Every structure is written in C-alpha cells, then in structure tokens.
C-alpha cells in the first residue's frame, strides 16, 4: 500500500499521504483581491466600445429590462458614445495607460509588500475590462488560495458598484467545482482610518494653495434617484463621509457641500449636481473653490477630466476666481493604511 502513496509537500497542513497518481493539489493559502471599477484597454473606438458595452450591460448599473435596454445600448449609444468617451480618456491617458489601472496595481503591490507572504497573496482586478475578476480568482485558486477576501474599492456602498463586484465574483464561483471560501469586504465610508486619510490629504493640499477657499465641494459619483428610493444607502453614506471629514477638520457648518457628478441619461439623479453647483457658486459669492472626490480612492476619468478639467472650465466661465482639485489617495501611504485596515477587519480569523 505504501508503494502507491506519497506525501504531497505542497499541501500545507496535509495529513497522510496522497496516491502517486493523484492530481496536483495546492491549498491552504489566503488571497486578497482588490477590485476597482475598470478601464478600457485603450482610447480607440473599439476598445471603448467593448468596455462601455460590458459596463453598461450590467443590470446593477442600468436597471432597465435587458431586452429593451440592449436595443438602445447596442444601437445609438454604442454608435456614438465610444468616440466621445475616447476623446475624454485621451486627455488623461499616460505612458502607463489608465491612471485607475496604474494606481490599483500599485495599491496591490504596496499592500502585498506590507502583509503578503508565502501563504497570503494580494492581487487586483477590474470589475469591467482587464484584468478581469474571473482571471484573477482563477489565478489565486491555482496558486493555492482556498480562502479569498474580495475588497471592492468603493468607500460608500451602492448596489451599482459594490454589489456588482460581489455579483460578478459569485458568478465566477458558480462555474468552479472546488470553490474557495469567500468573504466580501464591507464599505468603509465612516471608518476612522479613512476619514483621517481624507482629512490629512485635504489639509496638505490646502496648505499648498495661494488662496483660501470660500467653499469645499465633496463631489461623489451620482446614482439615479430611483435607486435611492428603492433603498440604496449610497446617498446616506456620502453625506456621512462629508460630515465626518468636516468635523475632523473643524469646519463650520455649510463650508463643505455634498454634490453628485457623472449623471447619465434623462432620468433624475441624486442632487445637487456638481456641474450645476459649480456654475451657481460664483453668483452666490463663492468664487474660490476646492473640490474633493471622496467616492474615488484612485484618480480616474471622473476626477482628472470631469472635475479637474471640465469642472474648472464651468466654474471659471461662471465667474470663479480660483479652483483646485484635491488628488485622490492613490498609492500614498495613507491609501495603503486604509486598504490594510479594511483587509484586516474583513479577514479576521484568517490572518493575524
């Protein structure tokens, strides 16, 4: 009997020998998968079309019956929008490609340097585009991860973002015979380490300016108001983040405003809208403004183009005098502190 058995050294904690003809088994490791929204592979028409088609086909993003929506999406929207979006992405594209992809990769690398080991692997994925959640879950499983913690990099929970990451991760597991144990990290919109990181980032940025702002806009990515009416907590999470940051920095009531950007389509979205607010502020006497993006842990199209470029133009054309956008946390030590805190909280019992 012993002649046909062997101990498989690659199985941590394995008890007893395995048959010599047994398929290779690697297990016992823990995987941490950081997931952000996504990015196109390039700024050309077809790269943009593939990305937008995947993104806008997600029923969590567009809550319209798919047969009806796909006729609209695959027709007029994906005929014209890829070119427009491609022009916007070209304004922020770097030698390293998409800033969002670059910073998410750096966050995973830096977190891995802090807490990674032979038995703890940190990696990253994009919910839409590449690298996909499916490819990275498969890679972690192949490396021996039988426990995986998926961390949606959205501070404030929304069904259109956090829940979508969870849905698409669960869908991957549906096709696996040997599924890893899975945990999904909770939102961190009110966690002290996140509030402290935001406050520190804002304070440091304000110290570099040659003006004192009349108002600070805390601009969050919007969602349709109908989603809020159905019970999505995102609106409440955003307002709580603004309140906690304002309290942490000792700001007077009304100095910080919560606004919402990036609306899409004809339906009503969460208000007040960032662009409309920027156009109205100079007439209200607020001619010096600083904008913060607490919903984005990494700079992306919405922060670098929509806020830093379009927002500036809208504000200055309306009579503004000074305008500045606070960079996202990106791959700063503060960002890694936040992500590490989230990971340690949601892998309790798995890692020390």
Image: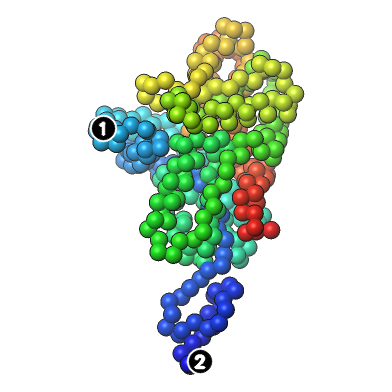
Front residue of this view, candidates 190 and 340: 190
Q: Is residue 225 above or below residue 58?
A: above
Front residue of this view, candidates 28 and 318: 28
Task: Compute the Cα span from label 2 to label 1.
Answer: 64 Å
Front residue of this view, candidates 21 and 51: 21
Residue at 40%, 26% in the rendered image:
264
In the picture, the disc for residue 252 is none
In which quadrant of the rendered image does the C terminus lie? bottom right
Residue 139's spot in the image, x, y percent? 47, 60
Circle 2 packing at 10 Å, graded few (<14), some (14-19), many (20+), is few
In the picture, the disc for residue 68 is 1
Q: Is residue 87 above or below residue 311?
A: below
What's the colour scheme?
rainbow
Return the disc, 2 or 1, that comes first in the chain's sequence: 2
Q: Is residue 101 visible?
A: no
Residue 80's spot in the image, x, y percent? 30, 29
Residue at 66%, 47% in the rendered image:
341
Residue 70's spot in the image, x, y percent? 27, 35
In the picture, the disc for residue 2 is 2
Circle 1 packing at 10 Å, graded few (<14), some (14-19), many (20+), is few
Q: Is residue 227 visible?
A: yes
Name the quadrant containing residue 52. Answer: top left
Residue at 29%, 36% in the rendered image:
66
Front residue of this view, candidates 214 and 316: 214
**Which element carries disc 2, helix, strand or loop?**
helix
Name the quadrant containing residue 68. Answer: top left
Residue at 49%, 31% in the rendered image:
232
Residue 155's spot in the image, x, y percent? 58, 37
Task: Name the residue furthest right.
Answer: 250
Tell me if 69 is positioned left or right of 276 in this view.
Answer: left
Name the quadrant containing residue 250. Answer: top right
**Which element carries disc 1, helix, strand or loop?**
helix
């Amino acid at each position: 009997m012993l002649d046909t058995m062997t101990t498989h050294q690659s199985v941590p904690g394995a008890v007893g020998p395995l048959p010599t003809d047994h398929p290779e088994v690697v297990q016992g490791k823990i995987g941490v998968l950081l997931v952000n929204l996504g990015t196109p592979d390039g700024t050309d028409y077809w790269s943009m079309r593939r990305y937008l088609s995947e993104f806008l086909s997600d029923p969590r993003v567009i809550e319209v019956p798919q047969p009806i929506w796909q006729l609209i999406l695959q027709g007029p929207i994906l005929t014209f929008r890829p070119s427009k979006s491609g022009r916007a992405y070209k304004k922020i594209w770097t030698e390293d490609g998409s800033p969002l992809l670059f910073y998410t990769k750096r966050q995973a690398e830096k977190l891995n340097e802090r807490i990674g080991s032979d038995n703890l692997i940190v990696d990253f994925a994009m919910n839409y585009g590449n690298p996909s959640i499916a490819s990275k879950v498969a890679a972690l499983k192949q490396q021996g991860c039988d426990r995986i913690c998926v961390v949606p990099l959205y501070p404030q929970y929304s069904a259109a973002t956090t829940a979508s990451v969870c849905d698409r991760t669960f869908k991957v597991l549906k096709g696996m015979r040997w599924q890893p144990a899975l945990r999904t990290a909770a939102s961190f919109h009110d966690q002290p380490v996140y509030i402290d990181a935001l406050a520190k980032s804002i304070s440091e940025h304000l110290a570099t300016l040659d003006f004192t702002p009349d108002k600070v806009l805390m601009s969050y990515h919007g969602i349709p108001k109908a989603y809020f009416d159905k019970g999505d907590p995102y609106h409440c999470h955003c307002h709580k983040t603004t309140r906690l940051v304002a309290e942490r920095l000792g700001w007077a009531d009304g100095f910080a405003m919560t606004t919402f950007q990036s609306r899409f389509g004809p339906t009503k979205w969460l208000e007040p809208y960032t662009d409309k607010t920027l156009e109205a502020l100079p007439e209200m006497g607020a001619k010096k403004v600083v904008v913060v993006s607490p919903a984005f842990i990494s700079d992306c199209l919405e922060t670098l183009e929509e806020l830093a470029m379009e927002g500036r133009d809208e504000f200055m054309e309306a009579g503004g005098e000074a305008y500045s956008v606070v960079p996202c946390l990106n791959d700063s030590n503060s960002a890694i502190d936040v992500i590490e805190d989230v990971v340690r909280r949601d892998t309790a019992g798995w890692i020390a």
